[in-house]
Amino acid sequence: MTALDLMRSGEPFAASYLDMPNDLQPRAKRLCWRLDQLDPSDAAARMELLSELLGTCPPEARVNPPFRCDYGFNIHLHGFALVNYGCSFLDTSPINIGAGTMIAPGVVLACAGHAVHPAQRAEGVLTSAPITIGNNVWIGANVVVCGGVTIGSNSVIGAGSVVTHDVPEGVVAAGSPCRVLHEVRESDRVEVRRLG
Protein backbone atom coordinates (compact mmCIF):
# COMPACT_ATOMS: atom_id res chain seq x y z
CA MET A 1 0.00 0.00 0.00
CA THR A 2 1.32 3.44 -0.91
CA ALA A 3 1.06 6.56 1.22
CA LEU A 4 -1.57 7.91 -1.20
CA ASP A 5 -3.63 4.73 -0.80
CA LEU A 6 -3.40 5.10 2.98
CA MET A 7 -4.35 8.79 2.83
CA ARG A 8 -7.41 8.08 0.67
CA SER A 9 -8.52 4.99 2.62
CA GLY A 10 -10.51 6.85 5.26
CA GLU A 11 -8.83 4.76 7.96
CA PRO A 12 -6.79 6.31 10.79
CA PHE A 13 -3.04 5.79 10.39
CA ALA A 14 0.41 6.67 11.70
CA ALA A 15 3.33 7.04 9.31
CA SER A 16 6.70 8.68 8.93
CA TYR A 17 6.60 12.19 7.55
CA LEU A 18 9.29 11.09 5.10
CA ASP A 19 6.96 8.45 3.60
CA MET A 20 4.21 10.97 2.85
CA PRO A 21 3.77 12.41 -0.67
CA ASN A 22 5.31 15.72 0.39
CA ASP A 23 6.12 16.49 -3.25
CA LEU A 24 2.36 17.05 -3.82
CA GLN A 25 2.09 19.87 -1.28
CA PRO A 26 3.67 22.59 -3.47
CA ARG A 27 0.87 22.07 -6.02
CA ALA A 28 -1.77 22.73 -3.36
CA LYS A 29 0.15 25.76 -2.07
CA ARG A 30 0.36 27.23 -5.58
CA LEU A 31 -3.35 26.70 -6.20
CA CYS A 32 -4.26 28.26 -2.82
CA TRP A 33 -2.02 31.24 -3.64
CA ARG A 34 -3.70 31.64 -7.03
CA LEU A 35 -7.12 31.45 -5.35
CA ASP A 36 -6.07 34.26 -3.02
CA GLN A 37 -5.02 36.43 -5.98
CA LEU A 38 -8.25 36.12 -7.98
CA ASP A 39 -10.56 39.06 -8.62
CA PRO A 40 -13.46 38.49 -6.18
CA SER A 41 -15.97 39.03 -8.99
CA ASP A 42 -14.48 36.29 -11.21
CA ALA A 43 -16.69 33.39 -10.11
CA ALA A 44 -15.86 31.25 -13.15
CA ALA A 45 -12.09 31.40 -12.51
CA ARG A 46 -12.65 30.68 -8.80
CA MET A 47 -14.72 27.58 -9.59
CA GLU A 48 -12.16 26.37 -12.12
CA LEU A 49 -9.38 26.70 -9.55
CA LEU A 50 -11.40 25.01 -6.80
CA SER A 51 -12.27 22.14 -9.14
CA GLU A 52 -8.55 21.67 -9.79
CA LEU A 53 -7.59 21.95 -6.11
CA LEU A 54 -10.30 19.96 -4.32
CA GLY A 55 -11.27 16.31 -4.64
CA THR A 56 -14.96 17.18 -4.99
CA CYS A 57 -16.31 20.68 -5.51
CA PRO A 58 -19.81 21.15 -6.96
CA PRO A 59 -20.60 24.45 -8.70
CA GLU A 60 -22.74 25.73 -5.83
CA ALA A 61 -19.91 25.43 -3.26
CA ARG A 62 -18.13 28.58 -2.07
CA VAL A 63 -14.61 28.87 -0.64
CA ASN A 64 -13.54 32.39 0.31
CA PRO A 65 -9.84 33.25 0.35
CA PRO A 66 -7.51 33.16 2.04
CA PHE A 67 -7.71 29.37 2.18
CA ARG A 68 -5.00 26.84 2.98
CA CYS A 69 -4.78 23.06 2.70
CA ASP A 70 -2.07 20.40 2.66
CA TYR A 71 -3.08 18.50 -0.48
CA GLY A 72 -6.59 19.45 -1.62
CA PHE A 73 -7.46 16.14 -3.30
CA ASN A 74 -8.72 14.76 0.03
CA ILE A 75 -11.31 17.55 0.53
CA HIS A 76 -14.84 16.74 -0.64
CA LEU A 77 -17.72 19.23 -0.61
CA HIS A 78 -21.07 17.52 -1.19
CA GLY A 79 -23.48 20.19 -2.45
CA PHE A 80 -23.70 23.82 -1.39
CA ALA A 81 -21.19 24.57 1.35
CA LEU A 82 -19.67 27.86 2.45
CA VAL A 83 -16.07 27.88 3.65
CA ASN A 84 -15.49 31.42 4.85
CA TYR A 85 -12.31 33.53 5.09
CA GLY A 86 -9.09 32.29 6.63
CA CYS A 87 -9.82 28.55 6.95
CA SER A 88 -7.11 25.86 6.99
CA PHE A 89 -7.78 22.19 6.19
CA LEU A 90 -5.02 19.67 6.96
CA ASP A 91 -6.24 16.93 4.63
CA THR A 92 -3.83 14.05 5.20
CA SER A 93 -7.04 11.97 5.44
CA PRO A 94 -10.40 12.56 3.71
CA ILE A 95 -12.47 15.56 4.79
CA ASN A 96 -16.13 15.22 3.79
CA ILE A 97 -18.40 18.25 4.17
CA GLY A 98 -22.15 17.79 3.72
CA ALA A 99 -24.58 19.92 1.73
CA GLY A 100 -25.80 23.11 3.37
CA THR A 101 -22.86 23.34 5.76
CA MET A 102 -21.53 26.76 6.77
CA ILE A 103 -17.97 27.07 8.03
CA ALA A 104 -17.15 30.42 9.61
CA PRO A 105 -13.87 32.37 9.37
CA GLY A 106 -10.74 30.95 10.94
CA VAL A 107 -11.88 27.32 11.19
CA VAL A 108 -9.20 24.61 11.22
CA LEU A 109 -10.06 21.04 10.17
CA ALA A 110 -6.98 19.05 11.21
CA CYS A 111 -6.83 15.41 10.14
CA ALA A 112 -3.09 15.53 10.78
CA GLY A 113 -1.48 15.23 14.19
CA HIS A 114 1.79 14.07 15.69
CA ALA A 115 2.82 11.10 17.80
CA VAL A 116 2.38 11.71 21.53
CA HIS A 117 5.58 9.86 22.48
CA PRO A 118 8.50 12.32 22.19
CA ALA A 119 10.87 9.76 20.60
CA GLN A 120 8.36 9.08 17.82
CA ARG A 121 7.74 12.81 17.35
CA ALA A 122 11.50 13.31 17.00
CA GLU A 123 11.51 10.60 14.32
CA GLY A 124 8.82 12.47 12.35
CA VAL A 125 5.88 10.17 13.04
CA LEU A 126 2.58 11.79 12.15
CA THR A 127 -0.96 10.59 12.76
CA SER A 128 -4.03 11.11 10.63
CA ALA A 129 -7.75 10.34 10.77
CA PRO A 130 -10.68 11.50 8.60
CA ILE A 131 -13.14 14.27 9.44
CA THR A 132 -16.79 13.97 8.45
CA ILE A 133 -19.25 16.86 8.69
CA GLY A 134 -22.92 16.13 8.03
CA ASN A 135 -25.49 18.20 6.15
CA ASN A 136 -26.67 21.62 7.33
CA VAL A 137 -23.99 22.01 9.98
CA TRP A 138 -22.87 25.43 11.18
CA ILE A 139 -19.31 25.62 12.51
CA GLY A 140 -18.66 28.93 14.28
CA ALA A 141 -15.60 31.17 13.95
CA ASN A 142 -12.18 29.89 15.02
CA VAL A 143 -13.30 26.33 15.74
CA VAL A 144 -10.72 23.52 15.61
CA VAL A 145 -11.98 20.07 14.56
CA CYS A 146 -9.50 17.26 15.24
CA GLY A 147 -8.91 14.15 13.17
CA GLY A 148 -11.29 11.24 13.62
CA VAL A 149 -14.29 13.46 14.42
CA THR A 150 -17.75 13.19 12.88
CA ILE A 151 -20.20 16.08 13.34
CA GLY A 152 -23.81 15.02 12.82
CA SER A 153 -26.20 16.76 10.45
CA ASN A 154 -28.12 19.85 11.60
CA SER A 155 -25.74 20.57 14.48
CA VAL A 156 -24.11 23.84 15.51
CA ILE A 157 -20.59 24.16 16.91
CA GLY A 158 -20.08 27.35 18.93
CA ALA A 159 -17.29 29.79 18.09
CA GLY A 160 -13.85 29.01 19.52
CA SER A 161 -14.64 25.36 20.30
CA VAL A 162 -12.12 22.53 20.10
CA VAL A 163 -13.89 19.41 18.83
CA THR A 164 -12.01 16.28 19.89
CA HIS A 165 -14.92 13.78 19.88
CA ASP A 166 -17.95 13.04 17.71
CA VAL A 167 -20.94 15.39 17.95
CA PRO A 168 -24.41 13.84 17.37
CA GLU A 169 -27.05 15.13 14.96
CA GLY A 170 -29.28 18.09 15.80
CA VAL A 171 -27.45 19.58 18.78
CA VAL A 172 -25.75 22.79 19.84
CA ALA A 173 -22.26 22.05 21.16
CA ALA A 174 -19.48 24.35 22.35
CA GLY A 175 -16.41 24.62 24.52
CA SER A 176 -12.87 23.39 24.83
CA PRO A 177 -13.22 20.50 24.78
CA CYS A 178 -16.49 20.76 22.88
CA ARG A 179 -19.54 19.24 24.59
CA VAL A 180 -23.23 19.09 23.80
CA LEU A 181 -25.19 21.94 25.39
CA HIS A 182 -28.69 21.03 24.19
CA GLU A 183 -30.66 19.71 21.25
CA VAL A 184 -31.66 22.17 18.54
CA ARG A 185 -35.21 23.12 19.56
CA GLU A 186 -38.15 25.13 18.35
CA SER A 187 -37.24 27.94 20.77
CA ASP A 188 -33.97 28.41 18.84
CA ARG A 189 -35.90 29.99 15.96
CA VAL A 190 -35.26 33.72 15.52
CA GLU A 191 -37.73 36.33 14.34
CA VAL A 192 -36.98 37.19 10.74
CA ARG A 193 -37.69 40.68 9.46
CA ARG A 194 -38.86 40.82 5.90
CA LEU A 195 -37.09 43.68 4.19
CA GLY A 196 -38.00 45.53 1.05
Image (cartoon, rainbow, N blue to C red):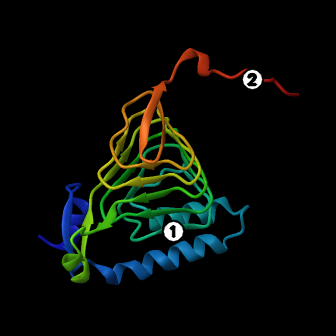
- Residue underneath mark 1: 68
**In this picture, residue 82 sits left or right of residue 113:** right
Q: Is residue 136 above or below residue 8?
A: above
Check residue 192 in the rendering and tell me which mark sits there, or answer none.
2
Q: Is residue 187 something that shows in the picture? A: yes
- Spatial distance from mark 1 to mark 2, Cα to Cα? 35 Å
Residue drawn at point x = 53 percent, y = 56 percent = 107
Q: Is residue 186 above or below residue 163?
A: above
Q: Position of residue 42 (x, y in %)?
A: 69, 63
Residue drawn at point x = 59 percent, y = 75 percent = 34
- What's the amino acid at mark 2? Val
Q: Nearer the viewer, residue 86 or 74?
A: 86
Q: Position of residue 141 (x, y in %)?
A: 59, 50
Check residue 89 in the rendering and tell me which mark sits there, or answer none.
none
Q: Position of residue 91 (x, y in %)?
A: 37, 63
Q: Residues within 10 Å of mark 1 (few under 14, many from 20)?
A: many
- What's the amino acid at mark 1? Arg
Q: In the rendered image, which quarter is residue 127 located in? A: bottom left
